[in-house]
Amino acid sequence: MTTHERPLDSVLETIGRTPLVRLQDGPDGVRIYAKLESFNPGASVKDRIGRYMVERMLERGDVPAGGTIIEPTAGNTGIGLAIAAQQLGLDAIFVVPERFSVEKQQLMAALGADIINTPTEDGMGRAIERAYELADELDDAVVPQQFSNPLNAEAHYATTGPEIYEALDGEVGAVVAGCGTAGTLMGIARYALEQDPDTYVAAVEPEGSLYGEVLGAARKEDEYKIEGIGTHDPSTNELFDPELVDDVYPVSDERAHDELKHLARAEGHLVASSASAASVAAKRVASEIDNGELTTPHETVVTIFPDSSERYLSKGIYGSFDEWSS
């Protein structure tokens, strides 16, 4: 895992093979592991889909050599796509709602991308609309559209899932991951269920998000501070397949904030709120396995830590909850 024993020709070759690390704070009888995606060159899980989607689209002729990638994104996908586009000879334009991390937007620009902001109050829906408007205005431009492109989930089916099973010799009892586009969880879940159909699959969302409604759970829509996961309109998250998911675990902003500080102090994980929300949910699942509420093929839970807290320091992520959530 994360070992490169020979010189590499491109930064793209460093994507994937991230560490799988056991979390110490959980039931004694159930092991919890987190895949640390900040070890990717762009420091997030989205590097995987950046490389995979751009390479496949070039192979299929969806975008010509020298063309332009245009994507609506909260930031990490833009960074992953920008790395791939730059290495593969494409231009990149990203449409980002204003409220999202300034650090991410600066990094996309540093990688040669153009950034266009849309109003925060218009949400990701307007960012998606604007991306397609731009694509219509330009020649040789394509919108990969991470929210609906099957290549998103396929990237994790081809890479993340197999890496997890290789590291644990196939002994995976439950998979727990946050859902934004849902591509990460859907790809891993499909791979996991092919290995053992009894594997428990849990999605994670912030309180105030509406993913749970897709599985028939009651949800109250509200604003939330956790970035990168959740949805106010499940119809825009076309990749989410309820047939692959056993349950959706909501996590409050306050609980996620407490956990991200705990993970730093107790275990040395400098992760952001989507990772801490996933950690909270993974520990719940582990406890349910430990006390007999859930039966899984193995007493192991695997989750994903998508990125690093460093991209959110300007938002006071390690300050008080009131400072961070204001």
Image (tube, rainbow, N blue to C red):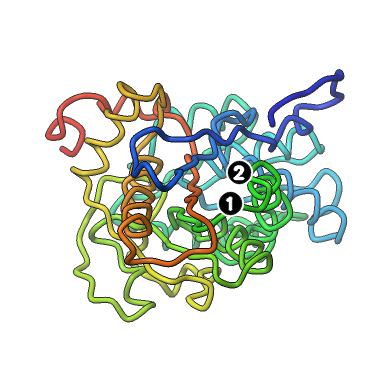
Q: Amino acid at mark 2?
A: Ile
Q: Earlier in the sequence, mark 2 or mark 1?
A: 1
Q: Are marks 2 and 1 in contact (CB under 8 Å)?
A: yes
Position of 40 with respect to 301 (left or right) is right
SS for dot 2:
strand
Rendered location of residue 87, percent (x, y): 78, 33
Q: Nearer the viewer, residue 79 or 116?
A: 79
Rendered location of residue 246, percent (x, y): 43, 71
Q: Residue at x 76, y 33 (%)?
A: 12
Rendered location of residue 63, percent (x, y): 79, 55
Quarter the N terminus occupies: top right
Q: Residue at x 79, y 56 (%)?
A: 57
Q: Residue at x 42, y 48 (%)?
A: 30
The image's mark for residue 93 is 2
Dividing the picture into quarters, in which one does residue 7 lie? Answer: top right
Position of 322 with respect to 77 (left or right) is left
Rendered location of residue 115, percent (x, y): 52, 38
Which residue is outermost to the bottom? Answer: 216
On the question of residue 98 being in view, the answer is no
Mark 1 — residue? 71
Q: Amino acid at mark 1?
A: Glu
Dividing the picture into quarters, in which one does residue 26 lie? Answer: top left
